[in-house]
Structures are given as structure tokens and as C-alpha cells.
């Protein structure tokens, strides 16, 4: 009888361990299925976005996949990263500074990427370095690297955050990065264009297309000269119209006057509600880098401003109040133009509690389809523009 009891206990424990093992396997499989579903959802989302853009513009199917991607502007600081190589060593952007190199986005499930594999192994070790930011299985990459004798760094990105920060919504895609860690080429799409970057010369930030007919002040700031605007309606008490920087602070924004509009297909009245907000990477006034994707999960009020814009000054106190009252639910971001020191003085004078970043010309405004200040876009937690563009101080403050 005692033997039977021992046997029953042993069998019970064996069943317990077997069930526990089966449960662990099921949990792992479930996790794998979830990851696969997330990856599939992301790919479908990218495909739907591209197809939607084609449909909006009535493009034919002959347009190469990914042609809608504009990428980061030349001269933009390359978004930083901290990823591990296949050997387990951590690499950051700083590790590659000092010489131009090619940063390419790759995937072990991408057919076009796989066609690059043998060529990557033939890259001259003494030539320009190729750094692959790849998504997929580490063992699959290790096998591919061994079979094709790669000597390029392969950094595995678990998610798509970095790929999104570089505005590369497909693979293969890449940039030439200069010795200072700046974008030195337009985004290259496809295996051959990416590999061609290995022999390309780094580009300097291009002179922006002349978009502005300069007004009487000759500055071409994207807003009508003060003499045209007339009396200020938002000047503080004690200030007379025409006196001080508030003299041009009327209750409406002043639109940019452009050349050759009939010859251009650039959107100039703002991206509509429902559009995925274009990502950007800019430095704030203290040199810290910000990307729009950093604020996913929180609503963003994106404001375009200028240091020589009266209405921009008029809306500033309201933006400060708005940011402080809604700090838990809303992130205010300002993209400004003008001199660095002038922007610092303005930010200090108004006590801006939010990041102020500078665009060199109109490169970010171009992405958002409107060359004017002040204007603002309300972006939801998923990075989609909630409402049509708000133009002028009062509409901006009423946008939230």
C-alpha cells in the first residue's frame, strides 16, 4: 500500500511538471504570435499609408513603392541611438563620428534586402563603413552575415522607433551621415541607391528654394510687413500701436506670399485632419535633440513661430498658460525661425515651459504644407493630426 502511495505521488508530480512545461510553451507561443501580429499590423499600416497617399494624389501604380517618403532634410542632426551589434557590443551615433558613413535600414524578411546580402560582404574594409539597422531575428542575421562574410556592423532594433525617427517607412532605405553626425544625403530608397551612398559625396545643407517675395522690410519672414498689418489688437496696456515689438500683433496670422504657385504641387494650406503628422528631428535652444515620435502617447500642440512675427508674440503668453494648465495631457512644441540668441531671449522673456526648436529655413513647414506664422497643428496620441490647421493667435489657443 505504501508503494502505491509513493507511485501516485510521483505520477502526480510528473503531471504537474508536464502541465507547467506545457503552460510555459503556450505562453511563449502566445507571445510570439502577439509579436508577429504587431509586426504584421505595422507593415499593413505602412502599406495603407502609402496607398492612401497615392490615392489622394491620383498617382498611378508605376510610382515606386516608398516614393512618398521625403526623409530628413540634409543638414539635420541624425537621431541618436544605442543598439547592440550581433556580437553584443553597444553602439551609439557617437561611435561612428569622425568619418562619413552609410546608415541603412534593413530586415531579414525583406526580399530586396536579401539581394543586398552578397554585395554587403564585398564592401571594401578600407572604404566607407556601412551600418545596418535591422529588424528581425538575431540568429537569422548571424547566419546571413556568416554566409556572406559581412564585416559591417549590424544593429538589431527590436521596434520601429529609430526607423520612424529617421522617417524611413520601408526597407531597404538609408542615408549618408557626415563626419559630424548630420544627414548628408536625401533618403535613398532601394538596394542600389543605398549602396551607391558608399561612393557619394556628403552634401551641405542646400540653399532653400526662394519661397518668399520680400516685403517692404526686405526680410522675407513669411508674414506681411508691420506697415501692412496696421494697429495692434493684442498689445499690452500702455503700449500704443506702432510702438515696440507688439505693434504688429494683430489677431490673425500673416500668410506667406510665394512665387510660382501654379508650377508647384507642394501643399500650401496645411495638412488636413486625419493625416499622419510628419516626423522631424530638431535641436532645441540648449542643443538637446527632439523628435515628434518621442511624444507618442500624448497629445501634441505643434506651433510654428518666428522671432520677427508680431502675432507670434501675441500668442506666446496664452501658449505658456495652456502648457502649464494641461501639462499632464498635452505637450506643446514650438518650431521657430530666426537667430539662436533672439530665440533664447524670447523664450526667457515669456518663460516658455516647452521645447523651442529652430528650423533653418522652411524645411519643416514644407512637410506640414504651410509657410506661415503663427500656425498650429493638434496631433493626437497616435501621431495623427486631429483638426485642420489653426491660423492666428485665437484659433491656435482654441484648438485644444
Image (spheres, rainbow, N blue to C red):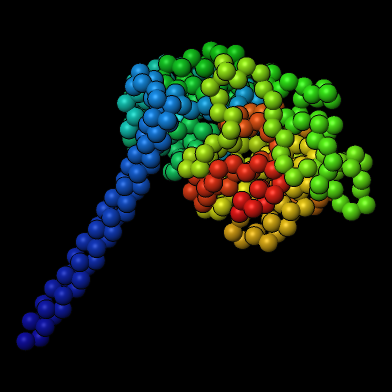
Out of 64 and 144, give the one closest to the viewer: 64
Looking at the rendered image, the quarter that the N terminus falls into is: bottom left
Location of residue 62 by image quarter: top left
Q: What's the residue at 40%, 28% (across, down)?
A: 54
Q: What's the residue at 58%, 35% (across, down)?
A: 270
Q: Residue 235 vs residue 110: left or right?
A: right
- In the image, farthest residue toward the bottom: 1
Looking at the rendered image, the quarter that the C terminus falls into is: bottom right
Out of 186 and 78, give the one closest to the viewer: 186
Residue 147, percent from left and from top: 33, 25
Location of residue 112 by image quarter: top left
Out of 136 and 182, give the one closest to the viewer: 182
As drawn, 72 above or below 307: above
Q: Residue 288 vs residue 350: left or right?
A: left
Q: What's the residue at 28%, 50% (across, down)?
A: 33
Q: What's the residue at 61%, 51% (across, down)?
A: 399
Residue 155, percent from left and from top: 47, 35
Q: Residue 157, can we see it?
A: yes
Q: Residue 162, can we see it?
A: no
Location of residue 285 by image quarter: top right
Residue 55, percent from left and from top: 38, 29
As drawn, 213 above or below 322: above
Residue 385, percent from left and from top: 52, 44
Out of 171 and 155, give the one closest to the viewer: 171
Amino acid at each position: 500500500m505504501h508503494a502505491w502511495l509513493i507511485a501516485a505521488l510521483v505520477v502526480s508530480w510528473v503531471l504537474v511538471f508536464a502541465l507547467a512545461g506545457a503552460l510555459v510553451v503556450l505562453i511563449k507561443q502566445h507571445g510570439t504570435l502577439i509579436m508577429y501580429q504587431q509586426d504584421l499590423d505595422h507593415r499593413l499600416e505602412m502599406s495603407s499609408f502609402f496607398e492612401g497617399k497615392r490615392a489622394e494624389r491620383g498617382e498611378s501604380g508605376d510610382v515606386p513603392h516608398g516614393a512618398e517618403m521625403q526623409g530628413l532634410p540634409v543638414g539635420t542632426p541624425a537621431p541618436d541611438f544605442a543598439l547592440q551589434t550581433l556580437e553584443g557590443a553597444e553602439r551609439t551615433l557617437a561611435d561612428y563620428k569622425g568619418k562619413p558613413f552609410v546608415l541603412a535600414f534593413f530586415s531579414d524578411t525583406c526580399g530586396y534586402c536579401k539581394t543586398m546580402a552578397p554585395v554587403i560582404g564585398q564592401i571594401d574594409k578600407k572604404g566607407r563603413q556601412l551600418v545596418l539597422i535591422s529588424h528581425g531575428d538575431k540568429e537569422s542575421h548571424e547566419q546571413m552575415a556568416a554566409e556572406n562574410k559581412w564585416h559591417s556592423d549590424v544593429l538589431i532594433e527590436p521596434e520601429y522607433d529609430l526607423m520612424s525617427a529617421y522617417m524611413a517607412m520601408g526597407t531597404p532605405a538609408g542615408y549618408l551621415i557626415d563626419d559630424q553626425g548630420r544627414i548628408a544625403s536625401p533618403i535613398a530608397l532601394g538596394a542600389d541607391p543605398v549602396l551607391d551612398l558608399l561612393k557619394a559625396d556628403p552634401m551641405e545643407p542646400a540653399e532653400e528654394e526662394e519661397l518668399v517675395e520680400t516685403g517692404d522690410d526686405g526680410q522675407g519672414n513669411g508674414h506681411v510687413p508691420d506697415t501692412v498689418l496696421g494697429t495692434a489688437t493684442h498689445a499690452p496696456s500702455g503700449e500704443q500701436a506702432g510702438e515696440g515689438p507688439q505693434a504688429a500683433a494683430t489677431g490673425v496670422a500673416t500668410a506667406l506670399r510665394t512665387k510660382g504657385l501654379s508650377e508647384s504641387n507642394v501643399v500650401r494650406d496645411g495638412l488636413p485632419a486625419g493625416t499622419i503628422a510628419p516626423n522631424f528631428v530638431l535641436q532645441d535652444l540648449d542643443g538637446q535633440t527632439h523628435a515628434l515620435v518621442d511624444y507618442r502617447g500624448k497629445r501634441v500642440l505643434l506651433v510654428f513661430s518666428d522671432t520677427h512675427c508680431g502675432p507670434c508674440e501675441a500668442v506666446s503668453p496664452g501658449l505658456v498658460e495652456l502648457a502649464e494648465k494641461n501639462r499632464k495631457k498635452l505637450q506643446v512644441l514650438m518650431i521657430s525661425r530666426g537667430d539662436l540668441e533672439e530665440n533664447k531671449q524670447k523664450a526667457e522673456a515669456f518663460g516658455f515651459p516647452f521645447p523651442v526648436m529652430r528650423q533653418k529655413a522652411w524645411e519643416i513647414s514644407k512637410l506640414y504644407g504651410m509657410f506661415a506664422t503663427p500656425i498650429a497643428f493638434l496631433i493626437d496620441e497616435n501621431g495623427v493630426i486631429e483638426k485642420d490647421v489653426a491660423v492666428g493667435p485665437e484659433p491656435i489657443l482654441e484648438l485644444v
